[in-house]
Structures are given as structure tokens and as C-alpha cells.
Amino acid sequence: MFQIGKTLVSEELLNEDFVCNLNKCKGICCVEGDAGAPLNEDELTVLDDIYEDVKPYLRPEGIAVIEQEGKYTMDTDGDWVTPLVNNRECAYLVFEENGFSKCGIEKAYEDGKVDYKKPISCHLYPVRVKEYSNFTSVNYDVWDICADACTLGKELKVNVATFAKDSLVRKFGQEWYDELMAIQQELNNQKK
């Protein structure tokens, strides 16, 4: 672990390889799991505000769950998450003709209907962030369904931090990310 500002960052972000391989997994991370996508408190208002613009992109099953349970729900740990269809896939998930899973929010974003890409937890994945009173932990989440992503990352020589650059900058800012890359460079120099 190392510290950047008020974050404690796992070295796995720099040491582990990862590039999503959607041709293999088809976005199964939006389907599998024991709860919906984690949400920050500030994202709740965003989901309230954008729902009507996102709704045309969603499946009828997702809309039904959202309109019955709400745009977000609380999981068994007391954390805010997206609701699930049949206790399985995210209610905001859509299935494309090619069998891939895609975020309906992201589709609306790509079409310019909303200015919110998707929940930051989804954008960051496989990076998981946990807020504590005095610091924020930034860790790499290992999940067996992402084995093909690890293989592709190794082939392409892309680590987690490089793969997740856009989302890390979105979450922590460019200066934070630049410091992360400086630490990576320092670690690489020590290995020589």
C-alpha cells in the first residue's frame, strides 16, 4: 500500500494486468454478483434527475423494478446500490443484439441525452473504492469472471491503473493520477 493525499492505494493497481475482454465475458459483471452497483450518496440525486432521459434505453423488466423499488435501493450492508431484476442483473442493464450487456445510462450518455456516464463504481471496475472517516482505500477487486481480462491485460502489458485511467481521473482528478504514475515510474526504476 502507498498513500496519495488521503487515499491508501493497493500496489496491485500497478502490479496486476487487466483489460476488459468483452468478446469473452460479454459484460457479465453487470449480471453476476450479490447486489446492485454500489452508489455514492451524490449519485442518488443524479439518478433521480436523469431517470426520465435514461428510461427509453431500459428494458421493460428494468423499468418495472425501478418503478416498484426505486431508482436505487439499500443493500443488506446499508449501502446504496442499483436495484436488480430477479435478484440478478442490474435494472439499468440492457442486452444488445450481439449478446453483450451494456449500461442503459451509458447508452443515454453516448447519445448525448445525459451528462453522467454511469455509476463511478461501474466505471472504476475492477478498482473498488471504500470511504472511511480519515481516508479512502483504493483496491483491485479480483473476480474469477474477469480471468480473460487478466489474460488480455498480460498480453497487452496493461496494468489495472492504466486500464482504469479515465475512471480514476474522474474519481480523484488528474493530479492524483499523475502522482500514481510517478509512483509507478519510481517502482519501475527500483526494479532496474
Image (cartoon, rainbow, N blue to C red):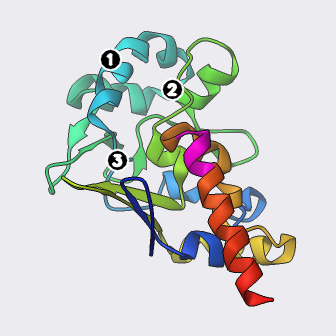
* SS category of the residue bearing label 3: loop
Q: List x then y, in percent, for residue 180.
A: 60, 59
Quarter of the image for residue 76 reads bottom left
- For disc 2, the neighbor class at 10 Å (few under 14, some 14 to 19, many from 20) is many
Residue at the disc numbered 2: 58
Q: Is residue 59 magenta?
A: no
Asked if the residues shown at circle 1 and circle 3 are in contact, with their CB atoms under 8 angstroms apart, the answer is: no
Alpha carbons under labels 2 and 1: distance apart: 15 Å
Identity of the amino acid at label 2?
Leu
Q: Which residue in the protein does label 1 denote?
A: 48
Quarter where residue 104 is shown? top right
Q: Is residue 71 visible?
A: no
Q: Which mark is residue 38?
A: 3
Q: Is residue 31 above or below residue 149?
A: above
**Region of the chain picked out in magenta, as a range:** 173-177
Pick the quarter of the image with the N terminus: bottom left
Q: Residue furthest bottom?
A: 192
